[in-house]
Image: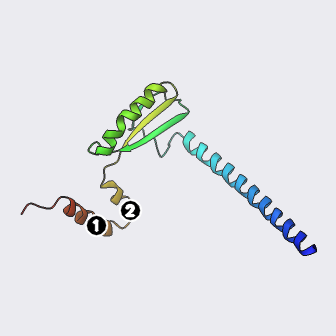
Amino acid sequence: MKRQTIVLISAAGLMLVFGLATYLYSSEQADRIEALAAAADSPLERPYSRGMGPADARVVLVEFFDPACETCRAFAPYLKALLAEHRNRVRLVLRYACAFSMFVLVENVQFFAPAFIAHSRIIHPPNS
């Protein structure tokens, strides 16, 4: 009986410590994200980025898109409908990100560039 009581008290204590640590971590992360979003030099919204909607909106959607991307083009009507529905509460910021820029962001471009070229040759074989 004594051993069972010790195990139950230990388990309850561990669960309490885990819950407290989770709460503290999530509140710290939320504060950090709010400070980052409120900063004038936000990493998501650049001065040259095109924005639609009020500048003081509480909700800011950032879309990384490529004008040549079919998926981006198919998604555009949904974003327009969302902005129309929540006209004064949502802001949309458009950031241009071409498909090749994903490889440039990686440190080892020498590895990813040949993979990208090989992929494009498989999808679009050269005319012989």
The front one of 105 and 76 is 76
- Give the mark nearest the N terminus, 2 or 1: 2
Is any atom of residue 44 visible in this view? yes
Q: Residue at x 26, y 44 (%)?
A: 68
Residue type, mark 2 in image = Val
Task: Give the image quarter of residue 16.
Answer: bottom right
Question: Which element is circle 1 on?
Answer: helix
Q: Amino acid at mark 1?
A: Ala
Q: Which mark is residue 106?
A: 2
Asked if 19 appears above or below 45 in the picture, the reply is below
**Quarter of the image containing the C terminus?**
bottom left
Where does the image place residue 105, in percent across and percent down from the top left? 38, 58
Name the residue furthest bottom.
3
Tell me, for residue 80, which label it has, or none.
none
Q: Nearer the viewer, mark 2 or mark 1?
A: 1
- Residue drawn at x 33%, y 42% is 72
- The reply to whether residue 66 is visible in this rendering is no
Residue 89 placement, left or right of 74:
right
Q: CA distance from mark 2 to mark 1?
A: 13 Å
Q: Which residue lies under the disc numbered 1? A: 115
Image point (50%, 24%), residue name: 88
Q: Looking at the image, which residue sits at the far left?
A: 128
